[in-house]
Amino acid sequence: MSDTPDLLSFSKASGCGCKIHPARLEAILNGLKPRTHSQLRVGNETRDDASVMAFPGGLLVQTADFFTPLVRHAADFGRIAAANALSDVYAMGGRPVMANALLGWPADGLPDAWASEMLEAAAALCDEAGIPLAGGHSIQIGEVVFGLSVTGAVAEGNLKTNAGAQAGDAIVLTKALGTGILAAAHKRLQLDDAGYAALIQTAARLNAEGAWLGEISAVHAMTDVTGFGLLGHLAEMTRSSNLSAEIFADSIPVIQEARALAAAGILPDNTWRNWNALEKEVEMEITDLNLFGILNDPQTNGGLLIAVAPEALPSVLDKLQKTAPEARVIGNFTSGSGKQISVRNGSPGNQ
């Protein structure tokens, strides 16, 4: 890819891997004074994907998401950044309505045409979602930063948060893991064409399933898997729902090329950051040690993580297969005590 824009030379971290360390972010947010508003339905209390406000006719969903490049090509980065920002609305069971771009650009170091290419690709992805990229804001800085502010809507009864899981619910993941590993290999010039194609296919795919999942009452909770990895975002669900969870190694979908890279020890630096924030809450009883890196891999626009009542599971999985063929049941929520998350060998139902 020597003929593509080298955005990565203006990026210290990659994609959602540039998030602030979970423990440090928690300390920052804990320093805020609690505030309430009569119409605010979801604020920052449970670290959810978006904020939600009541307004005449329904609920308004609002989010902003931006990060530094994880790929060299401007158009690919634009698509990924847009899909990642839209995912926050889908993860609340909502539908995006409009978006505005958030752009930080090193104008003295990169051609403006690359910024145009990035914005056009993001606008095309918004077209795919059926919404306009209506405007935005830009600043000149030393690193490339791009994302969207997204406004969405959700019917009162369709809102999903990360706090509604129930004991006995199945845990469903809609995308294979490994985008962080692929992005790290790409940055280190160790990713082949097949791996790059897998990265783009996964990270630029809309999580639009969230909109119809919001309409199903037996879907009790939902979030998306991004920079804190599968374990980090599952931990947010268990804490918010006051539950524990068990997941099973054999059931976890992994991008084939990422599995091979993990076996070769090619992992993002933030893999260890994610684990350090969680190790006291997770019990790992697995024989495939390569899975450790995958479970803690910082995803960019990873899949939806869903709590589904057992009676609705067959119909939900059947519908998911049409647009998210990698969707799998990876475990279940429990009311058990001890470690908050247990990772075990085997598959759900075989224990």
Image (spheres, rainbow, N blue to C red):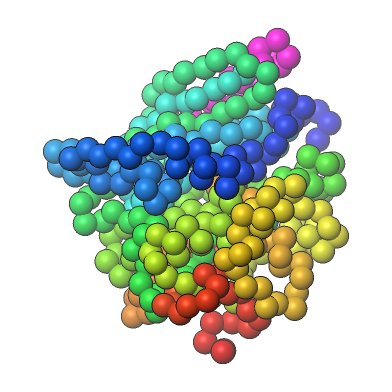
Residue 139 lies in quadrant: top right
Tell me the quadrant of the picture where the C terminus can be found: bottom right
Q: Residue at x 38, y 76 (%)?
A: 167
Q: State the image coordinates of residue 269 (x, y, percent, origin top left).
A: 75, 47
Question: Up-down: is 350 above or below 217?
Answer: below
Q: State the image coordinates of residue 72 (x, y, percent, origin top left).
A: 73, 33
Q: State the image coordinates of residue 120 (x, y, percent, origin top left).
A: 54, 26
Q: Residue at x 25, y 46 (%)?
A: 41
Q: Residue at x 49, y 48 (%)?
A: 206
Q: Is residue 110 magenta?
A: yes
Q: Nearer the viewer, residue 179 or 46?
A: 46
Q: Nearer the viewer, residue 345 or 186?
A: 345
Could you tell whether 166 is left or right of 274 in the image? left
Question: Up-down: is 253 above or below 39?
Answer: below
Q: State the image coordinates of residue 289 (x, y, percent, origin top left).
A: 76, 70
Tell me the quadrant of the picture where the N terminus can be found: top right
Could you tell whether 22 is left or right of 322 in the image? right
Q: Main secondary structure of the magenta part?
A: helix
Residue 229 lies in quadrant: bottom right
Residue 265 lies in quadrant: bottom right
Part of the protein shown in magenta: 106-123
Q: Is residue 196 magenta?
A: no
Could you tell whether 206 is left or right of 293 in the image? left
Q: Residue furthest left?
A: 56
Q: Residue furthest bottom?
A: 351
Question: Up-down: is 25 above or below 327?
Answer: above
**Residue 76 appears in the rendering:** no
